[in-house]
Image (cartoon, rainbow, N blue to C red):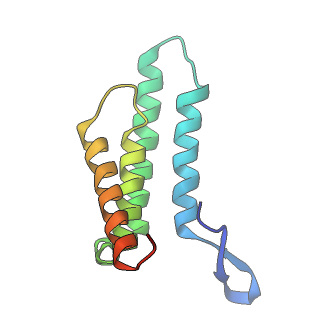
Amino acid sequence: MAQLVETTGSGGLPEISPIWIVEFAVDELYDIRDTFFPKDQMEKTARLQKYADAALALVERVIPQELRKSTSQRAQYEFLRGKILDVFPYYQKEAEDHLSKAVCTSSIFILMHGYA
């Protein structure tokens, strides 16, 4: 998980890492999946969709296109998108594709930098 405190902000106060905020939103999404059991399953699906849409928008803001040129940022972006899309009880090819890209990208990053 990302560090909670990234840098020192104005006035010497710590700032919250933007990626930590995204990871917190993803954790909240999975908490809803695992703990929210309404009588109507459509209510749960609607709530998951609402939170997933918000989390996906947050990922787009925190890791914009220009940052995704970095191998590590690209891997993190793909992983987070895949994890968000994988929260639903039904199979989504798009989630699998993003998670596969994250694995491939991070593997290439590891090999390029000699971490293997």
Q: Residue at x 67, y 84 (%)?
A: 9
Looking at the picture, does residue 47 appear above or below residue 68? above
Q: Whole-percent x and y of residue 109?
A: 36, 72
Q: Whole-percent x and y of residue 104?
A: 30, 59
Q: Quadrant of the C terminus?
A: bottom left
Q: Residue at x 46, y 22 (%)?
A: 43
Q: Whole-percent x and y of residue 65?
A: 28, 72
Residue furthest to the front: 116
Residue furthest to the right: 12
| Residue 50 falls left or right of residue 23 | left
Q: Residue at x 54, y 68 (%)?
A: 18
Residue 71 in which image quadrant: bottom left
Looking at the picture, does residue 6 appear above or below residue 11? above
| Residue 54 falls left or right of residue 24 | left
Looking at the picture, does residue 40 appear above or below residue 11? above
**Along the viewing direction, whichever of 58 and 80 lies nearer the viewer:** 80
Residue furthest to the bottom: 11
**Along the viewing direction, whichever of 111 and 106 lies nearer the viewer:** 111
Q: Whole-percent x and y of residue 16?
A: 64, 70
Q: Residue at x 40, y 80 (%)?
A: 113
